[in-house]
Image (spheres, rainbow, N blue to C red):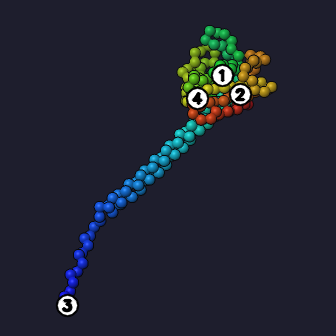
Amino acid sequence: MSASPPPPARQAGFTLVELLVAFALFAGLALAVVLLSRSALSTFAAGERALASAQAVERARMLMAADLGQAAARLHLDPEGRLLQAFTLTPSGFVLVRRGVRGLDPPVQRIAWGHDGQTWRRQAWPAVDGALPDRPVVVLPGIREVRLRVDAGQGFVEAWRPPSPEALPRALELTLVPAEGAPLRLLFLVAA
C-alpha cells in the first residue's frame, strides 16, 4: 500500500487578520494609558494650584493679622499736613499705623491694604507722617471683589465712624471673592 502524501505543512507566522487584531488591542491599551496619565497629571496640577493658592491665602492672612494685631491708636499726617485718624476704612481697603516694627526708627509704620479690581495689595510708607507711600505689593492675585466690615463693639458694620480720631475697631471682617472659586471670609482682631 502506498502511503498517502502528508498534509501540507502550515507556514509559521500570523495572518493579516491576527496582526490587525493585535494592533487594535495595542492601540486601545496605549490610548487607555495616555488618557489615564493625562488625567493623573491634570489632577496633580490642579492639586498643586490649590495648594499654592491656599499657601498664598495663609501668608496674606498672617501678614494682615500681624498688621491689624499691632494697630496703634496713633494719628498721622498726610503729605499736605492734614491730620488723619488712626484707622481709616476706605472703599477698597483700610489704612492704619502699626507699632512694633523692629529695625525701623521710630518702630511704627503706616500701612494700607487695598483692592485694585484684580489683586489684594499691601502698601507701606517710609515714614508715618507726611511721606508719600512706597509702591504697593501684590499679596493675592486673582481677587475679583473685596468686602470689609468692622466691629466697634456693637456688631459688624460696613462704615467706620470712630467715636474719636484715635479709636480703633475691635475686629475686622474681610471677604475675598476670587475670580475662580468660593468667597473666603476672614476675621481679625484689631490691636489684640
- Res. 72 mark: none
Q: Residue at image x 64%, y 33%? A: 183
Sequence-first disc among 4 and 1: 1
Question: For the residue marked with disc 2, what is the amino acid?
Answer: Leu
The residue labelled by disc 1 is 94
Q: Which residue is the extreme one toward the right? A: 154
The residue labelled by disc 2 is 172
Quarter of the figure with residue 176: top right
Sequence-first disc among 3 and 4: 3
Dot 2 alpha-carbon crowd within 10 angstroms: few under 14, some 14 to 19, many 20 or more:
many
Q: CA distance from mark 4 to mark 2?
A: 18 Å
Q: CA distance from mark 2 to mark 3?
A: 112 Å
Q: Nearer the viewer, mark 4 or mark 1?
A: 4
Percent across and percent down for residue 153 are: 80, 26
Q: Which residue is the extreme one toward the left? A: 2
Contact, CB < 8 Å: mark 2 with mark 3? no
The residue labelled by disc 4 is 143
The residue labelled by disc 3 is 1
Percent across and percent down for residue 119 are: 56, 27
Where the N terminus falls, by quadrant? bottom left
Dot 4 alpha-carbon crowd within 10 angstroms: few under 14, some 14 to 19, many 20 or more:
some
Looking at the picture, does residue 36 appear above or below residue 69?
Answer: below
Instruction: Say whether residue 173 is visible.
Output: yes
